[in-house]
Amino acid sequence: MAQTTRALLRQYLTQTIAALRDGWRVLVHRGPSQIQFWFIALAIGIAAGLAAVLFRKGITALQSALYQTENVQFLHSSAQLLPWYMILVIPIVGGLVVGIILHVMTDDGRVRSVADVIEGAALTDGRVETKQGIASMVASLITLSSGGSSGREGPVVHMAAVISTWVCARINADGITGRDLLGCAVAAAVSASFNAPIAGALFALEVVLRHFAVHAFAPIVIASVAGTVINRLEYGDVTEFVLNTPGSLQFYVELPAFLLLGLLCGLVALALMQAIFLAEDMGSHVQNWLRLPRWLRPAISGALLGGLAIWFPHIIGVGYETTIRALSGDLLLTSAILFAVIKVVAVAITMGGRMGGGVFSPSLMLGALTGLAFGYVATSLLPDVSGTATLYAFAGMGAVAAAVLGAPISTTLIVFELTGDWQIGLAVMVSVSMSTALASRLVDRSFFLTQLERRGVHLAAGPQAYLLAMLRAGAVMRPLGDARCMSREECEAMIAEGLSIPASATLEAAMPVFDRADVACLPVVIEEEGETEKPVGALYHVDALKAYNRALAATAAEEHS
């Protein structure tokens, strides 16, 4: 018995020494590189945080000059004092400048935003377009400063992605490293923009990277904290919204009302998204029908916004003044409903007119107005078992934003951090869960993923849907002359039958051909001058499946590392 015990102790001691040696070897050979990566994440966090703060200060300075106000938080009230023609002219001139910038700096006249960052994370190893991204940042700065009805989170996120792309190019980062650095930049930008470190980190993981891999968590948190520090050094440790009338939840009795509010907010979020898509389609149709130059499209949208702002100045800019009034209960029921409808129209005009900006801040305002209107009705029907209407405004703000972004976790946290009120989290969580559950089934998961789906980029269904689009037939084929490839004569015979695939085509295009033709391989061709199709190899069905399986395995390994 004693000998058995000593043998076990000796075995455990040997295993412990071996584990310590392995740990020391990892520390020596891999530790410095990991520490170096964290320092890079910290540097990116600081850079993205500074960029976000400078972007916000730029908007403040330009808005103050254009609308002659010292406090842009109350831009709505200041705009009411201006002559009507100034309210009309400012967004027109701003739209004209935006149109010229996008016409010169982009190939399609489109502002880059969060959807493009998500696409970069999934399909281009964490890289985004640099030149177009800088143009989009400047265009969005002018849009938000000159009366555009959108938010600043979209431009800030893409601007941060441009920074991480530049760093990735300098260090020749691989796909995993590039995506991690992209997440770091996005987290820092969101944190610095809204003073929300927890939500910033989770936004990068939930919305942009769309996984919660452990290896990405530490550097993203480091960058997020760095961005928050930059914000607080400039603005102090203050919340975005200061609530003077905190609500009180009548606990279980009132929860069914918040379930209903969540469903209503899901429908309101759907209305906002569909209005934007409809405005985009109508704008493109009118532009093509009238043969308007694309640089004129934002100016026309600016004219529509200016005309609307003469009667409803609350649509100008981010709209924080109206959001604060809704959260404080300082609006009538009819005003809340009317302002919500007009805000949807204004956001659709801004986004459909390709003026720039994001959708998060407008969704916060729309949610607060929706929640307040619902709260007035709920508290009047059951006054004895209801809290305050402002509590519903608070929950509605989170519910609409979460449904639009498709991000229930990070949106719930960012609403908490924007207000500093953690006492009514149950109401917010219930509303958010219902709104996202409903809206995600009526669109492709979120506003951003639906945008990509409309462009033919299929990310909503997950890696199994988009990985085939990342693999080219020319990269997977067996070249002619390979012992495992069919002969040139066999290739030419199949080409004559109409069975071939271009070398530049993706496996997403090739796989349906395999299923339809029921063949084991397809000739891969290239087009040359004077020769319609020249065979260069053959794509075998089994090789395509193997390549797809390897891509799936690599994605799963990254997401679970």
Image: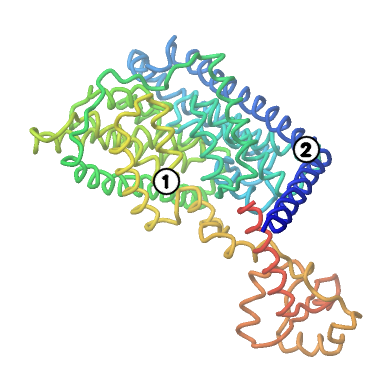
* Outermost residue, top side: 70
Q: Residue 341: in sight, yes or no?
A: no
- 47 relative to 527, above or below: above
Q: Quadrant of residue 503?
A: bottom right
Q: Marks 1 and 2, how far apart in space?
A: 48 Å
Q: Amino acid at mark 1?
A: Ile
Question: For this view, does 209 lie left or right of residue 310?
Answer: right
Question: For this view, does 32 lie left or right of residue 285?
Answer: right
Residue at 62% of width from left, 25% of height from top? 51
Q: Amino acid at mark 2?
A: Gly
- 517 relative to 325, above or below: below
Q: Residue 455: in sight, yes or no?
A: yes
Bin the neighbour count of mark 1 within 10 Å (Cα to Cα): few under 14, some 14-19, many 20 and up.
many
Residue position for label 2:
31
Question: For this view, does 369 lie left or right of residue 541?
Answer: left
Q: Quadrant of residue 225?
A: top right
Residue position for label 1:
276
Pair 1/2: label in front: 2
Q: Position of residue 465 (x, y in %)?
A: 57, 64
The residue lying toward the viewer, choosing from 347 and 429, is: 429
Q: Position of residue 329 (x, y in %)?
A: 23, 24
How many numbered circles does the render carry? 2
Q: Position of residue 239 (x, y in %)?
A: 42, 20
Q: Quadrant of residue 173?
A: top right
